[in-house]
């Protein structure tokens, strides 16, 4: 039996993708076969495609180990291996693995021990899949700090995937949120819960006379050096990027021992805990993922180009089921 999938054999640009007919994978005794309904194209997918030498240590030195891209999915269980007891055919499930799940395809096989979970009845496949990659990285920011209600946080890049989650999590913990976005996205950032929104095209947030307990640079466009002046003593800077000179992991070590303002580096781990946490928040109606555009599988190149532009708002969906059903 055959399925459609995005396919590539070389790192580099989205031009390397084609849509191929390949065999539907067969689940072994610990696996589930899932019919993919929705997946995202996200910045992790872009980083894997780009193939920096650091990334290649994990994804294949000379060519991608996995010829089908995609790190997350929401879909329906079709078949289970004999050791799978927690899921059954017909279940709606979703999951994420930043090293790749080959989910930009009509079907995938996933091991029962991976970070996956049932989708609650009131959550659509799209909302479920938009609550994975960006949420996991945002939760790992929050895990790095101890918050008290009323503390001040600045979130740079509040419309991005990670930023839009950070605004909502910060409000959940009772923080006062100042956030940056461009003019047209200011209403969205307010709606997500920001108390103050700074239009980054009109005003440099560094010019504010406020001081912050936390600065989350969710798009990695600033630096600890620049942000120091608006951090309180004891304040913490966290960025989603390594920094222009890959300095952030190093600063996370050195600022442990020097000065009162600290850098923390959010190495993401424990995806299962992130999924559990967001399911809890979703059930309390304290979290809603932001969805920007939807693409069909055939338009996967276009989707990657848009996401790599750094201008997406929240999440970009590949509507696999809708675009491939016969
Ligand atoms: N290496 C990896 O595996 C990996 C994985 C995930 C994320 N990351 C990194 O984490 C960062 C965030 O990822 P993401 O998915 O959350 O990002 P994203 O969704 O691609 O972020 C896009 C958003 O950034 C905002 N933005 C662009 N320039 C800005 C600026 N100068 N100031 C403020 N906002 C700006 C845009 O807002 P406006 O539309 O309002 O301009 C846009 O909505 C990225 O830098 C990404 O490279 C890396």
Image: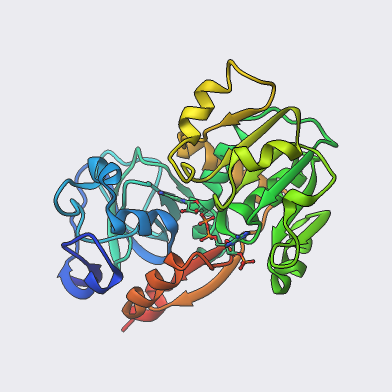
Q: Percent position (x, y) of residue 105?
A: 29, 67
- Residue 66 vertical placement versus 212 (above, below): below
Q: Residue at x 47, y 31 (%)?
A: 249
Residue 53 placement, left or right of 126: left
Q: Specify how the rendered protein is coloured.
A: rainbow
x, y percentage for residue 153?
75, 42
Q: Quadrant of the N terminus?
A: bottom left
- State the residue lying farthest toward the top: 257
Which image quadrant is residue 18 in? bottom left
Location of the C terminus (image quadrant):
bottom left
The residue depicted at 68 percent of the width and 49 percent of the height is 155
Which is nearer the eye, 148 or 255?
A: 255
Quarter of the image where one finds residue 192: bottom right
Ligand 1, image quadrant it occupies: bottom right
Viewer-side residue, 174 vs 249: 249
* Count of residue discs: 0
Whether residue 98 is visible: yes
- Give the image location of residue 211, x and y in percent: 81, 39
Location of residue 129 in the rendering, given as x and y in whole percent from the top left corner: 49, 59
> Left or right: 213 with respect to 120?
right
Q: Residue at x 39, y 72 (%)?
A: 305
Task: Please give left or right for residue 68 compared with residue 321 in the image.
Answer: left
Q: Judge whether residue 30 can be spotted in this image.
A: no
């Amino acid at each position: 039996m055959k399925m459609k999938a995005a396919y590539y054999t070389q790192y580099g640009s989205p031009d390397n993708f084609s849509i191929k007919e390949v065999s539907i994978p067969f689940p072994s005794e610990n696996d589930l076969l899932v019919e993919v309904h929705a997946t995202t194209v996200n910045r992790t997918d872009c980083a894997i495609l780009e193939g920096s030498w650091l990334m290649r240590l994990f994804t294949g030195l000379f060519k991608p180990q996995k010829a089908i891209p995609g790190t997350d999915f929401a879909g329906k269980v079709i078949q289970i291996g004999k050791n799978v007891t927690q899921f059954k055919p017909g279940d709606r499930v979703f999951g994420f693995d930043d090293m790749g799940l080959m989910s930009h395809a009509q079907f995938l096989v996933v091991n029962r021990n991976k970070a996956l979970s049932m989708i609650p009845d009131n959550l659509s496949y799209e909302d479920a899949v938009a609550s994975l990659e960006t949420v996991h990285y945002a939760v790992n920011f929050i895990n790095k700090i101890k918050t008290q209600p009323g503390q001040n946080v600045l979130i740079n890049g509040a419309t991005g995937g990670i930023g839009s989650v950070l605004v909502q999590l910060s409000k959940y913990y009772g923080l006062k949120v100042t956030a940056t976005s461009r003019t047209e996205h200011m209403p969205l950032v307010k709606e997500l819960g920001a108390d103050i929104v700074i239009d980054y095209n009109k005003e440099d947030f560094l010019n504010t006379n406020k001081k912050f307990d936390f600065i989350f640079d969710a798009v990695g466009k600033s630096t600890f050096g620049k942000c120091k002046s608006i951090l309180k003593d004891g304040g913490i800077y966290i960025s989603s990027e390594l920094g222009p000179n890959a300095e952030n992991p190093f600063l996370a070590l050195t600022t442990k021992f020097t000065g009162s303002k600290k850098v923390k580096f959010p190495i993401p781990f424990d995806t299962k805990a992130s999924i559990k946490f967001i399911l809890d928040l979703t059930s309390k109606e304290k979290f809603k993922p932001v969805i920007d555009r939807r693409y069909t599988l055939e338009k996967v190149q276009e989707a990657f180009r848009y996401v790599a532009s750094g201008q997406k708002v929240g999440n970009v969906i590949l509507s696999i089921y809708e675009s491939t059903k016969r």
